[in-house]
Image (spheres, rainbow, N blue to C red):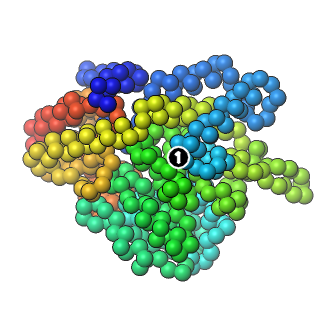
Amino acid sequence: MKADILKIREDFPILSQYIHNKKLVYFDNAATTQKPRIVFDTITEFYSKYNANIHRGIHFLSNYTTDATEKSRKTIQQFINAEKSEEIIFTRGTTEAINLVAFSFGESFIKENDEIIVSEMEHHSNIVPWQMLCERKNAKLKVLPFNEIGELETEQLNGLISDRTKLIAVTHVSNALGTINPVEDIIKIAHAKNIPVLIDGAQAIQHLKVDVQKMDCDFYVFSGHKIYGPTGIGVLYGKKELLNKMPPYQGGGEMISTVSFAKTTYNELPYKFEAGTPNYIDAIALGKAIEYLNCIGLEKINKYESELLKYATEQLKQIDGLRIIGEAKNKSSVISFNMEGIHPSDLGTLLDHMGIAIRTGTHCAEPVMQHFGITGTARVSFAFYNTLEEIDILTISIKKALTMLK
């Protein structure tokens, strides 16, 4: 894999540019990944040669683009091993996918005094929609805590579950800590009591092999822009039998079968949940991003990113005053840390002037920060186009920044 990195980096033109007269080192991959050339070439090609509204035309352009969109849906189905392509719903991203389930599943299955369980390490996108649902339905939100190294206390889950528990929503990988959660164990515990489970895969899908049938999750959600695809496109996977029981999230064109002023009947899956003109060109480009990943191989990617994580952890731990936040045994390629006496945003600003892009703040995970009694962290997150040499540049630059800030 290492020998291929230079060739791979050529597929990502943004990585060759200079920021503040320094070669860009991009370590903000948990926020969004950079895009391979095939993605924006696909977008340009379809807008310039094949653009036409899908599913509605009888002419060549419409049929061509429709076929490409449905091919992408099939690519995604195979990528996560869903049983049927109609279980793949295109959304604007993880956030909309969770909101879709919170509204649609919530309208059908959540009643007053029912309970929903989330974990303490969730991104706000997997907290707020459930809070809003609980407010609408007068239901209750319960929280599964994590311990001081950033691992979920799954042994407490059975005690949290009651006969009023109707859904569990949990992240596959924490965006703030990098923890890879034992989602299959959580699903088994939940399913033993007939409780469906939604998995937020926004930080997992680009790093880990996801098999929704083996996992047996009821819903799995992720964003295209975090898996080297375009912004504004995402995926909701749901088991067909559940999706068929849920009402449409939005009304409009395409999601209908027949319309009259007396009654409207709804379309079949997946179109029941894809009202209006979909973001079809970005859906096609997302399929191309996944094909690109398949050519490299997720196993190779995961192995190499694990090497990056191990090396970076070792190097950062040698810096005096640096404290890593979240040291779970099973982690993805994310390191959150704080420097004694230095605000994360000050460090991030100085690193930016050295050409290094990192993320600082709460990472839309304020309960995680509250758990550790901190206001935020600096976060570096790696992708398969990053290098060990870039990690060396990071550690040297942090040490240089410390001399300027102290």
The spot of residue 110 in percent (x, y) is: 61, 71
Q: Mark 1 = which residue?
A: 80
Q: Quadrant of residue 254?
A: top right
Q: Is residue 342 visible?
A: no
Q: Residue at x 47, y 54 (%)?
A: 200
* Depicted 400 relative to depicted 268: above or below: above
The spot of residue 88 in percent (x, y) is: 62, 47
How many numbered badges does the structure rendering display? 1
- Which residue is nearer to you in this view: 213 or 13? 213
Quadrant holding the N terminus: top left
* Depicted 105 relative to depicted 316: above or below: below
* Depicted 361 relative to depicted 186: above or below: above
Q: Is residue 272 visible?
A: yes
* Depicted 270 relative to depicted 386: above or below: below
Q: In the visual, does 77 lie left or right of 143?
A: right
- Which residue is nearer to you in this view: 6 or 178? 6
Q: Residue at x 70, y 59 (%)?
A: 244
- Which residue is nearer to you in this view: 55 or 93? 55
Secondary structure found at label 1: helix
Quadrant holding the C terminus: top left
